[in-house]
Image (cartoon, rainbow, N blue to C red):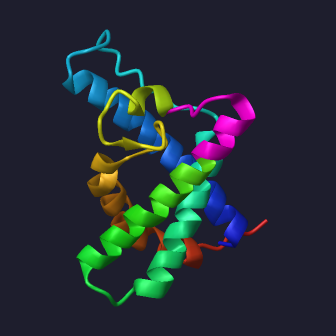
Amino acid sequence: MRLGGRALTYGLLGWGIEVVYTATKEALKGEGDGKLRGESYVWMAPIYAAGGLAGEAVVATLGGRPVWERGLAYAGAFWAVEASSGEALRRLVGDVPWGEDYRRYRDNLGGGLIRLSYLPNWAVAGLALERVTPLLKRLRLEP
């Protein structure tokens, strides 16, 4: 699959995972009405696309390194995408879509741009991407 197709796939995959994550998190907290209604923002699809492509750069550069090093690198790459896109959105629309949620926690940086406690989430997401990316690169879509 070409770069554009992979970016689209990363965007949609990230979007879907976020919806499932938010629904599950709400259910585990005992909140909501039990309908497992997840949520996201339209802005997130291109942000997840950029994150997926940043993850490709990490694996291309650090593919042979130990898992913990790659995990930290993925978290750093994803935080960079999250912070830069969040700051761009803050300037464009006045706030970060996830900022209200993030600002409730002490580990947020940049006024809700990122949360340090998401390091394990981003590390695992990046390590999972190592399995997805080769499949996408081999995939051929015929007209």
Q: Is residue 70 magenta?
A: no
Task: Give 96 or 143, whichever is nearer the viewer.
Answer: 96
Q: Position of residue 107 (x, y in %)?
A: 30, 42
Which residue is depicted at the point 25% across and 22% down? 27
Left or right, residue 25 beside residue 101: left
Q: Quadrant of residue 95?
A: top right
For the question of whether residue 2 can be seen, the reply is: yes
Q: Position of residue 14 (x, y in %)?
A: 49, 48
Q: Is residue 71 above or below residue 106?
A: below
Q: Is residue 117 above or below residue 24?
A: below
Which residue is depicted at the point 62% across and 49% down? 85
Considering every residue shown, the one lying at the far bottom of the view is: 64
User: Which secondary structure type mostly characterizes the magenta part of the structure?
Assistant: helix
Considering every residue shown, the one lying at the far right of the view is: 143
Q: Is residue 36 above or below residue 131?
A: above
**Which stretch is magenta?**
86-98
Which residue is depicted at the point 57% across and 34% down? 96
